[in-house]
Image: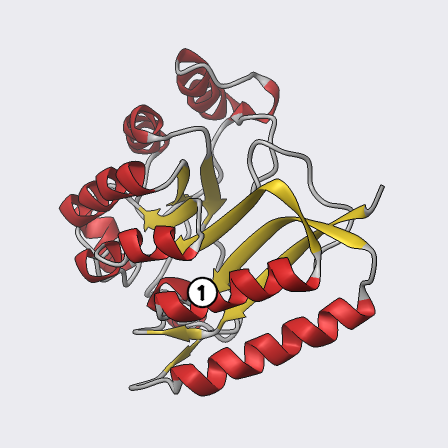
Amino acid sequence: MSAPLGVYIHWPFCKSKCPYCDFNSHVREGVEQVRWRQALLTELEHAARETPARRVETMFFGGGTPSLMEPATVGALIKRTKELWDTAPDIEITLEANPTSVEAGRFTALAEAGVNRVSLGVQALDPAALKFLGREHSVAEALDALAVAKKNFARHSFDLIYARPGQTPDAWADELERALALAGEHLSLYQLTIERGTKFFADHAPGSVKAPRAWSAKRRRRRCSSGRRHGWPRRGCRPTRSPTMPGRARPAATI
C-alpha cells in the first residue's frame, strides 16, 4: 500500500497585511494569475518526481489568502495533483478563506473546482476586536460567510484569536460559547502572540499594544466546560482530530 501524503499549496498574496501576521504573505495591487498558475503546476510536477509511489490523502491551500486565487487556478492544481499521484477516493481538499462578502461569493465556484472543505479566518465575533486585528470583514459578514460555506462544502471550520488586549477570561468564555454554537466539526483557537517584524511588535515596544495578564487555571477550566457542553471531549477541550485536516489522521508526510 502506498504511503500517505499531504499536499500543501501556498498562495502568498493578501489584500492587506494583518498587524499580527508574520507569515509569508504580501500585499499586491494585482497578481499575474496565469503565470502563478503555471509556476505552481511546475512545482507540483517537481514534487511528484521527488515523491513517487505515494498516495495523496489531503490537499491544503494556505496563505496568504488563497480564496483570492481564481477558481480556475484551484481547479487546475487539484486536477494535476490527481494526475501526478494516486489519490484517496475521499481526498479532503481544504482552502483557507476570509469571510468577506466578495470572497464568499466565490465559494460556489471553488466547490465546483473540487474544494470540499473551507477554513474561514473569522478571528473574532466582536466588532471592536475585528477592527483591532485589522480584519476587513464585519461580524455580520462572517456569519453570512459561514452560512454560505455550509451550503457549498461538506465540511467547514473557522479560526478565532484569543488573549487579545483588554479581553477578559469571562468575555472570552462568552465569545467561545457563541463560537461553539456556530462551529461544525472543527474550531481552531489561537492565542495572540506578538511576533517580531509585525506591526503589533512595533506597537508593543512603546506600549501601544499590551498583552493581557496570564489567565488563571480556573478561567481555563470554565473555557473547557463550555466546550464539553457542546460535545467536545475533555482532553485539550477540542475534537480529537488534526487541526488542519479534521476527521482523519495526519499523513505521514506533507509537501
Q: Amino acid at mark 1?
A: Val
| Foreground of the two, 110 or 67 | 110
x 39%, y 87%: residue? 32
x 53%, y 60%: residue? 78
Where residue 55 appears, as percent x and y from the top left, is 74, 50
Quadrant for the N terminus, please. Answer: top right
Residue 172 vs 65, above or below: the answer is above
Q: Is 241 on the left-hand or right-hand side of 113?
A: right
- Mark 1 falls on what kind of element? helix
Where residue 172 appears, as percent x and y from the top left, is 34, 33
The residue that disc 1 covers is 74
x 19%, y 51%: residue? 128
x 54%, y 26%: residue? 239
Within 10 angstroms of label 1, few (less than 14), some, or many (20 or more) residues? many
The image quarter in which residue 244 lies? top right
Spot the residue most to the left.
Answer: 140
